[in-house]
Amino acid sequence: MGNNKRKHERFEALNLLSYVSFDADGKEWNQGMGRTLNISESGLQLEIHEPIDPKYTLLISIGIEDELIELKGKVAYTNRGEGKMFEAGIEFIRVPPDALVILKKYISEFNKQYNA
């Protein structure tokens, strides 16, 4: 197996999300729903019904516990997942400070719970 190039460790997490995809000119191309498979401070892997072209940028809204956070990410890859589903790796390119606080708290709590 190759070296892990990720900045932050990812944790398994199942959270519903919605996304809107935009091209380089800011034109909206598609929107959809999915769920996270894992998440970190710098990215996530999501499960979706249709592949997302890596040329798009995504505006993502994720429900984390009782909070809704919005962040922007770029598609690193899209692969066929299980059954008719697809998996996409997303690298965050903009996480507002308030969303980062919620994300870090969620990851910290998750880490405590599963590594205790």
Image (cartoon, helix red, strand yellow):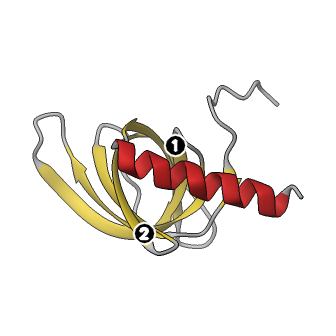
- 31 over 115 or under it: above or below: below
For residue 64, say whether it is visible.
yes
Give the quarter of the figure containing the N terminus: top right
Could you tell me residue 76's position as x and y percent? Answer: 47, 37
- Residue at position x 22%, y 60% in the image: 30
Q: In this rendering, which labeled residue sits more in front, label 1 or label 2? A: 2
| Residue 38 visible in the displayed image | no
Whole-Å distance between the Cαs marked 1 and 2? 18 Å
Q: Residues within 10 Å of mark 2 (few under 14, many from 20)?
A: few
Q: Left or right: where does residue 22 sit relative to residue 92? A: left
Quarter of the figure with residue 61: bottom left
Q: Nearer the viewer, residue 43 or 103?
A: 103
Question: The residue under label 2 is which amino acid type?
Answer: Glu
Residue annotated with mark 2: 67
Percent position of residue 40, x then y:
59, 46
How dense is the environment of label 1, judged by Cα within 10 Å: few (below 14), some, or many (20 and up)? many
The answer to whether 95 appears left or right of 1 in the picture is left
Residue 15 x %, y % = 53, 69
Q: Secondary structure at mark 1?
A: strand
- State left or right for residue 61 relative to residue 105: left
User: Which residue in the structure is indicated by mark 1?
Assistant: 43
Residue 109 placement: quadrant: bottom right
- What kind of residue is marked 1? Gly
| Residue 115 % position (x, y) | 86, 55
Mark 1 in CB contact with mark 2 (< 8 angstroms): no
Name above or below for residue 17 compared with residue 104.
Answer: below
As drawn, the label of residue 88 is: none
Among the two numbered marks 1 and 2 on one chain, the one whose residue lies closer to the N terminus: 1
SS of the residue under disc 2: strand
* Residue located 69% across and 40% down the image: 9
Q: Residue at x 25, y 64 (%)?
A: 31
Viewport quadrant of the C terminus: bottom right
